[in-house]
Structures are given as C-alpha cells and as structure tokens.
Image (tube, rainbow, N blue to C red):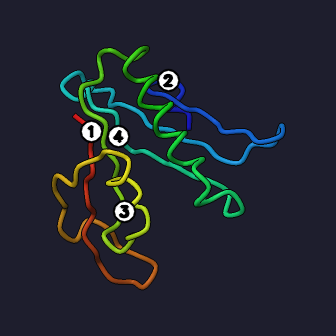
Amino acid sequence: MENSFKLGLSIVVENENKIIGFMKACTSEFRALAHVLTNTTIMIHPDYQSKGYGSQMVKKYCSLIENKLKYIYRFELLPHESNHKSISFYLKNGFKAEASSVKRVFNYKENFEDEVRPCLV
C-alpha cells in the first residue's frame, strides 16, 4: 500500500458509507519502468461481487490514470493462471491477455503455476 500511495494510485469503493472494495497499483522506482502501473490489487467484498461494483471501479481507476497519471502508458495486472474468474473479469473490462510468465507463482497447493499478464496499453 505504501508504494501505491507514493508511486501509484489507490481508490476505495463505498456503499452506504461502508468500504466494500479497493484497488491499488504502483510504478517502479526505476525510471525505465516508471511508465508501467503494475502490482495491481483489486478487491470487492463477496456480498457485493457480480453487481457491477468491480467494473465501475476499474472504469473509474482507468479514468484517473488517463487524467491524473499522464505518464502511465501501460497498466498491467498479474493474476495466477488458475484465477479464471479474475482473468475473465479483466478481459470483460477491456484488458488484453498479452503474455504469461511460466512457473512464476508458487501457489497454496505447493506447486508452480503461470502468471497471466492482462494489460491496457
């Protein structure tokens, strides 16, 4: 979270004065990667999932990038390949599955899986 405050963007979603979700991402401290917003986390409380809040949050987040972080030319997410629900959500919201990193994640089943890289450019 600290890096997203210092080097990126964080937002929350509220419903009836209650935080039901948040989204954060950050850039690198290295100048060569400062145009890439990555290490994204998106969370919506389970009671509010599949009700449009996530899509609204992504749309607002992308609008903030476009209007306030004009130096960002690439916005990427890094879900595990087994996270089909998230990957489907990202693709539905305009992200393109660009690449994957083979055996990038050691998961809770104690084996490796690929990391998929949906992004907006």
- Residue at screen point 40% across, 75% down: 107
Residue 2 lies in what quarter of the image? top right
In the rendered structure, the answer to whether residue 49 lies left or right of residue 77 reads right
Q: Which residue is mark 3?
A: 88
The three-letter code of the residue at mark 4 reads Thr
Task: Give the alpha-carbon distance from disc 3 to disc 1, as whole Å.
Answer: 15 Å
Q: Nearer the viewer, residue 32 or 64?
A: 64
Label 4's element? strand
Find residue 1 and report its horizontal and vertical position in percent. 56, 38
- Do the residues under discs 1 and 4 have CB atoms within 8 angstroms? no
Q: Which residue is mark 2?
A: 6
User: 66 above or below 112?
Assistant: above
Residue 113 lies in what quarter of the image? bottom left
The mark nearer the N terminus, 4 or 3, is: 4
Mark 4: few/some/many CA within 10 Å (<14, 14-19, 20+):
many
Residue 12: assigned label: none
Task: Give the alpha-carbon distance from disc 4 to disc 3, as whole Å.
Answer: 18 Å
Q: Which residue is mark 4?
A: 38
Q: Nearer the viewer, residue 78 or 112?
A: 78
Residue 35 lies in what quarter of the image? top left
Find residue 90 and report its horizontal and vertical position in percent. 37, 53
Location of the C terminus by quadrant is top left
Label 2's element? helix
In the rendered structure, the answer to whether residue 51 lies left or right of residue 92 reads right
- Residue at screen point 66% across, 39% down: 13
The mark nearer the N terminus, 3 or 1, is: 3
The three-letter code of the residue at mark 3 reads Ser
Mark 2: few/some/many CA within 10 Å (<14, 14-19, 20+):
few
- Do the residues under discs 3 and 2 have CB atoms within 8 angstroms? no
Q: Which residue is mark 1?
A: 120
The three-letter code of the residue at mark 2 reads Lys
Q: Nearer the viewer, residue 76 or 101?
A: 76
